[in-house]
Amino acid sequence: MNMDDVARRGLVLLGCGKMGSALLDGWLKGGLPAASVWVLDPAPSDRLQKTGVHINAGLPDDPAVALVAVKPQMMGDALPSMQALGGGGTLFVSVAAGTPLARFEAAFGAATPIVRTMPNTPAAIGRGISALIGNAAASADHIALAEALMGAVGQTVRLDHEAQMDAVTAVSGSGPAYVFHLIETLAAAGVAQGLAPDLAMALAKATVGGAGQLAEDSAEDPAQLRRNVTSPNGTTQAALEVLMDGENGLPKLMARAVAAAAARSEELSRG
Ligand SMILES: NC(=O)c1ccc[n+]([C@@H]2O[C@H](COP(=O)([O-])OP(=O)(O)OC[C@H]3O[C@@H](n4cnc5c(N)ncnc54)[C@H](OP(=O)(O)O)[C@@H]3O)[C@@H](O)[C@H]2O)c1
């Protein structure tokens, strides 16, 4: 199965909020015909209505894909609407945080191919990263199709075990919020040093955005990029001595933050 099959047989999108609409925008931009998409959502946005997709118009007979993008807590209400698609012909893809493959297998049967993915919010600008894992019924073709679908909003990586999803959630799923907080705290620290708030925020945003892009684009790893801008006894070194402190610095703080998120993810997926 590939994107041509999706165009021919159709795709059902269950839930068209922030993540669902980011994906839909990516697919339509990538050439998927609007007539191939069936959206189910109780409150379709004006923007969605203008796309030309089918909205709350039932289900096609044999869609290639059903993509689940409702909040985890809405799953119990939402999944029964897709019951008819279980059993094998339709690939299910879920972007729901903390909802295990077993939950979908219980709803649709273990013969149903299901790929669970964890995207993140930069998907809204096509700069997300999604980790994927399939159930036993998901073939290499199914995984490749799920990758193509998630690739519409950024990079993709494959996992070996579903248990890795908790760590992925804690690093890249929740990670954008850590970076937003870094921007907030860097700007506030600039204000404490006498800069006007707007100026400090402009400096902090561009610094994090620019350094993030440089880290992604560069052939050198982030540790080397850091060394490259740290002159002996200079200003950067003075700051890094505080940030990299073994006891009170960022390494331990970040490890604790990520461990807390991973533990919470594990707890949520146990239900
Ligand atoms: N946003 C992200 O960056 C992100 C990142 C990783 C994973 N995810 C996952 O993506 C999923 C969606 O998150 P989101 O941020 O896009 O949430 P969202 O903006 O609240 O979108 C969910 C959409 O589903 C609709 N919905 C609710 N019940 C439904 C039902 N029974 N049938 C069909 N549609 C229904 C909601 O409509 P109403 O608003 O009218 O209830 C809403 O439009 C979640 O499971 C989340 O874990 C999101």
Image: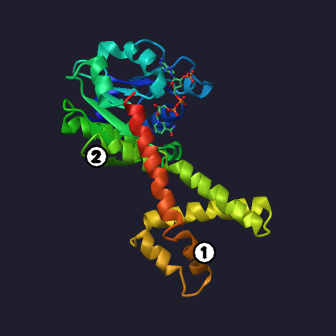
Q: Is mark 1 within 8 Å of ligand 1?
A: no
Q: Is residue 202 visible?
A: no
Q: Label 1 neighbourhood size at 10 Å, few (<14), some (14-19), many (20+)?
A: few
**Comparing labels 1 and 2, the label whose residue is closer to the camera:** 1
Residue type marked 1: Ala
Compare residues 234 and 86 and report the one nearer the observer. 234
Residue, disc 2:
159
Q: Residue at x 72, y 66 (%)?
A: 190
Q: Residue furthest bottom?
A: 232
Residue, disc 1:
239
Above or below 14: residue 141: below
Location of residue 13 in the rendering, given as x and y in whole percent from the top left corner: 42, 25
- Mark 1, secondary structure of its residue: helix
Location of residue 117 in the rendering, given as x and y in whole percent from the top left corner: 36, 38
| Quadrant position of the N terminus in the picture | top left
Q: Residue at x 42, y 17 (%)?
A: 76
Above or below 8: residue 223: below
